Each structure stands twice: as structure tokens, then as C-alpha cells.
Image: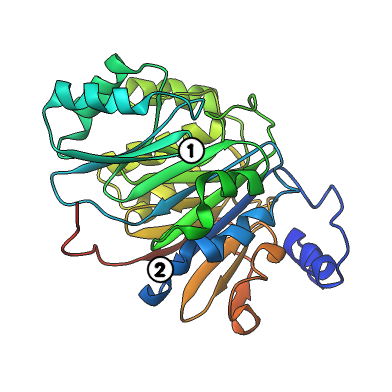
Amino acid sequence: MNFSVYAVGLQLVAKSLPLPNKVRLMCGIVGLYLKNPALESQLGRLFEPMLEAMTDRGPDSAGFAIYGDEVAQGWVKLTLQATTEQYDFKALIAALQSTLDAPLDWFQNASAVVLKIQAEEAPVRAALAELAPTVRIMSAGQSIEILKGMGLPREISERFGLASMKGSHIIGHTRMATESAVTMEGSHPFSTGSDLCLVHNGSLSNHFRLRQNLRREGIHFETDNDTEVAAGYLAWRLQQGDSLKQALDKSLEDLDGFFTFAIGTRNGFAVIRDPIACKPAILAETDDYVAMASEYQALSSLPGIENARVWEPVPATMYIWEREPAEGARS
């Protein structure tokens, strides 16, 4: 008989029994990668119950990274977030446009703004740091948008209108804080590279040393969260020319601790667990999608899940799904 965390959890969920605390360990991870483009208009609606199913694992804060609405070459898309919905983003955008003199488009979503601008990322970041030092840049790239905050997963879903969102893939996280304070900035996902993000269940024991080394390599950190260090590590490896597979393979050597990671990129989705694999994870695949979660109950609402191939990810093994870059991206 298989006595893994996944197997125990699956048996209890099937019997509608509550999971014991020793099974429900720190934070919840969910991800959904659509293989069928016809479902992209339903991505948010399909994902919302997955995120909310992980409430017991992470009641402190929640967030998600969604990929879609890709901008054209020469443009960059950034997600900006303030601590309050009353922040004067209109004045900030006007000042930014005056500073950079570049075409742009933007819309506000609660305490966040999605900004699309015809410019290089570096000067946009520099201008924002000068004009609005208290506003956080949550993500930047061609496709990614990261939205997160303090509160229950349902509150975060409703705050940002998750159910109506469209896209190709999405990863999310519900947090039970263990390594750092409960803040908007400390919520997952974390992004330290273009169109790259990571969510994490577990704890890294060598994140202080890694943070120092990565800072010397030019990686910038906003928080003291160990997950941001893991995201920074992957960003650095990709900058060195590694493929995602190579970067993840090296992470098994360089990251000490226990972890389950879900990683989002512009064109793909990946899952990896540490060699001991004490943090639960489950994968499901059909012709239409690939889904992952910390517990099976988060997958139970998906269409066709009863016929899906369902399995527990093997420790120290990479699972990667990628698609060809979209052509004719729009601004």
C-alpha cells in the first residue's frame, strides 16, 4: 500500500473526511495549463475553484500569475500594485508618459494596474522607481500578469475578478506564512525575470547565502522570502543561457531544503519536487489540459477529471509542458 502524503490525502478526500494537520502542511499550490486553445476564454472560471479549494492550506494570503493578452515585440507589459485601491494611478501613468514619451495603454484592477508600454523594460523600471517608489512591480514581460494580496483565496479571487480572466496558463498559491511576515509583497507568486514566476510549498535552508550570491550577480530582491530567492535563482540560470530543464536540474543541486515548485514561463508550465518530496503534489492530464495541486480536491471541479491520467510527481523529476511562441502577438 502507498502511504505517501498524496495517497493518504486522496483517500481522505474520497471519504469526505478532513485532512489531519500532519498531512495539510504549509501552503497550497495550484496550476492549470491549457492544451486546448478553445478553453482559454474559460481559464479564470476553471481555475477559481482550484485556488479556493486550498484555503485551509493558506488562509493568510493568496495570489496568481496568469499568462495571456501578449503584447507585440517592442512592447513590455508590467503589473504594478499599490497597498490601496485609492492610489492615484492616473497621475502616475500621466507622469510616466511625460517622462518616457512612449505610447502606452493601461487599466486598473483593484489595487493593481496592468501597464503596456512601447519601451524597453529597464527604463520603465527606472522611471517608476523615481516616480513611485512605494508602488511594487509584481511582474514584467510579454504575457505575464501577477495579482496577489492578503486575505482568504476567495477574497483575492473576487477582488481581482479571477473568474472572468482569459489566458493560456495560470499558477496560484495560498499562503500560510512560516519564513516571513504576512504582507502583500510576501505573497506568492514571485517573479524576478521576464515572464517568469514561481510558487513554492516548503522551506529553503540556504536562502540567505544564495540571496547574497545572487545579489552579486545582479539579481534584485524585494522581500526576505525564501521563495523569492528560488525565483531569483531560476532567473539567473536562464540569464546564463540554461534552458528551463537545465535550470531546474541544477536547482536540485544548489537549493537545500524541501520544496514543491510550480513554475510559469511565457510558453510553459513546470513542476518539480525535491529528492525527499515530503511536500505533497498531484498532477492530472487530459487532452485539454494539465493541472497540478497540493491536494486532489483542488482538481475535482475540472471537466473530465474523472477520466484524466492522475499521478503523484516522482521526486527530483522535472515535468515540463511548453508550446511554440504565439505569432502575431498584439499590443
Inspect the image, locate mark 2, and give the three-letter code of the amino acid beneath it.
Glu
Decide if residue 226 is on the left or right side of residue 9.
Answer: left
Q: Residue 281's quadrant in the figure?
A: bottom right
- Above or below for 70 versus 231: below
Label 1 SS: loop
- The residue at 12%/33% (across/down) is 102
- Which image quarter is the N terminus in? bottom right
Q: Is residue 161 left or right of residue 175?
A: left
Image quarter of residue 215: top left
Residue 277 x, y percent position in the rendering: 65, 53
Task: Answer few, some or many: residues within 10 Å of disc 2's Cα (few below 14, many 20 plus, some between 14 and 19).
Answer: some
Element on which disc 2 rests: helix
Which of labels 1 and 2 is toward the front?
Answer: 1
How far from the left and from the top, in percent, is residue 325?
24, 62
Which residue matches tag 2?
40
Up-down: is 19 above or below 259?
A: below
Residue drawn at point x = 51 percent, y = 53 percent:
162
What residue is disc 1 on?
110
Q: Nearer the viewer, residue 235 or 27?
A: 27
Name which quarter of the figure residue 121 lies in: top left
The amino acid type, in three-letter code, at marker 1 is: Ala
267 up-or-down from 62: above or below: below
Which disc is residue 303 wearing?
none
